[in-house]
Image (cartoon, rainbow, N blue to C red):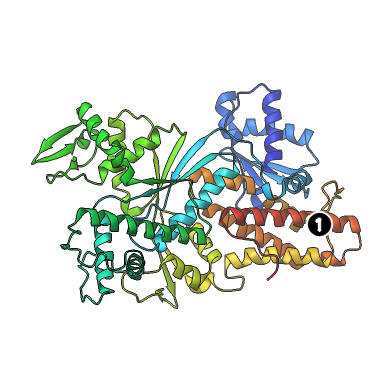
Amino acid sequence: MDKIIKKNIDKFINLNQLEPLNYSINLTKEKKFGDYATNFCFLYAKLLNKTPEEVANLLKNYLLDNYHDFYAKIEFVKPGFLNFYLKNRINYDLIKKIIKEGFNYPIYQSNNKKINIEFVSANPTGKLHLAHAYAAIFGTALVNTFLQLGYDVQKEFYINDAGNQIDLLALSVLIRYLNLFNQNLELFEDSYHGEEIIECAEALKKQYGSDLINTKYNKEHILDEKINETIKEFAKNYMLKMIKDDLASINVSFDLWTSEKSLYETKQVQQVITDLKKANETYEKDGALWLQTTKYGDDKDRVLIKNNQLYTYLVPDIALHVAKLLRNYDEYYNIWGMDHHGYIARLKIALKMLGFKKTFDVICIQVMKLIKDNKDFKLSKRAGTSLTLQDLVNAIGKDELKWICTSYQTSSHKIVDVNKITQHDASNPLFYVEYASARINRIFQKNEFQVNQDFEYVDIDNEKIVNLVNELSLYDQTLHHVIKNKETQALNNYLYKLAISFHTFYSELNISNLKDQKQKQTLLHILYATWLIIHNGLKILGIKAYEEM
């Protein structure tokens, strides 16, 4: 309905040869203020040298004269809003469009915008846990929304496979490997203690037998460099396969896996240092190389190369983003944990020092906390593990986990009650949406419904039906809202509201008892459009719509 109102107002603008301004049309918060409202009068008052009320009267008279069958009433509200009260008229053009485009609705042609999104990027040192699951599921839903609206999206996973943590991984695996040969050795405090380290050690034994039992090490790394590289590569690949399998189990995939190690091998990391020195943005102090980030507003300068001549994490991260920016995409996004927030400024400063005017945006996600029976939700007592992705899927359910990870504002602290999301009743928003899908399917089966794109609709004057169709009209707008704000919970909220509108409709109208076959078929086609929207919305979130429950 908002598109019809906009079309009517745009005709007024064209007729009066007015400059197009970016006015808005939104649903009103309460029905007593009408169905929709616009800020048109406020925006055009200055342009026309009139008061907002005078502009409102001009537009109001035009609309009521030319579209009197659509508007029941139009009212001006200070300081500059126009409220529209619509007649109980169903937007059948929308229903036809939804049914025609089906499981692809809304269809958008490519807008020729290329986007890179990096997310998850977990160190290949252990199993994925709740924070990784959150980033993976939220990131995929955001990507799906971009794709739906015609963007070309590249999903990237950055593998931190260089540096101290990989040496510690190899050392941890070696010690567990030696344990398998009855060597009573303890892991160091900084080692990795998860059960996956034991599993990796068992795989190492299967491949190399007892060939590595005399390997020497200290508390930091394996002493024999050749053996160190062998175990590092083996352990990294083992962990990476485990991560990929975990992601595949929740239908998350990536287009590009970028290795930190490869950035060193191709000299891209070293080139960063050379280029920053050429730009006169570095200096040496206390045997270390520093980046002059305070010149650009940072609270302190940052170390690039430590006095032991090892690179800090900042250097390969700069190299990674240089490589990204050279792809010449239109937009770049990183999905990071909130604990990385302070890291953003120094990385952007470094890129600007290298001459990049456009850099990247970061979507920071706050850690969520799960509770059950008013206590912290904990699944595993195994050393080194806490709420792994697979534990969560097994205990909560894949779809339930996806709903949780997409239904909250990313930057807010989240306390999620596991009891609520696993309830099979109306108190669980996901169940309520899934139940709407199953209920509609049951209506189709009972009435032996067959969709007909050329079906002739008949007018039905019923407020509940009008409200349901009005909700359908907001789906397209909701997807754009997700993209604009980089927040998926708008889609979850929309699907829940749509389910409420359907269940309200269902409780008051018994389609099966209708004698008028044209009315019955009209209602069934409206319900089919509703089912398609539920299906398509859940698909973006990675959730399958139920056919029966």
Q: How many marks?
A: 1
Judge from the rendering whether residue 178 lies leftward or rightward of residue 29; answer left or right: left
Residue 506 locus on image (x, y percent): 75, 65
Residue 434 locus on image (x, y percent): 64, 65
Please state which amino acid type lies under the numbered disc 1: Leu
Whether residue 509 is visible, yes or no, is no
Judge from the rendering whether residue 309 lies leftward or rightward of residue 527; answer left or right: left
Reply above or below: 495 against 275. Answer: below
Q: Nearer the viewer, residue 306 or 241?
A: 241
Q: Nearer the viewer, residue 115 or 219?
A: 219
SS for dot 1 = helix
Few, some or many C-alpha atoms within 10 Å of disc 1 (few <14, some 14-19, many ≥20)?
Answer: some
Residue that appears at 35% across and 39% down: 321
Residue placed furthest toward the top: 17
Reply above or below: 162 against 421. Answer: above
Q: Nearer the viewer, residue 280 or 127?
A: 127
Reply above or below: 219 against 342. Answer: below
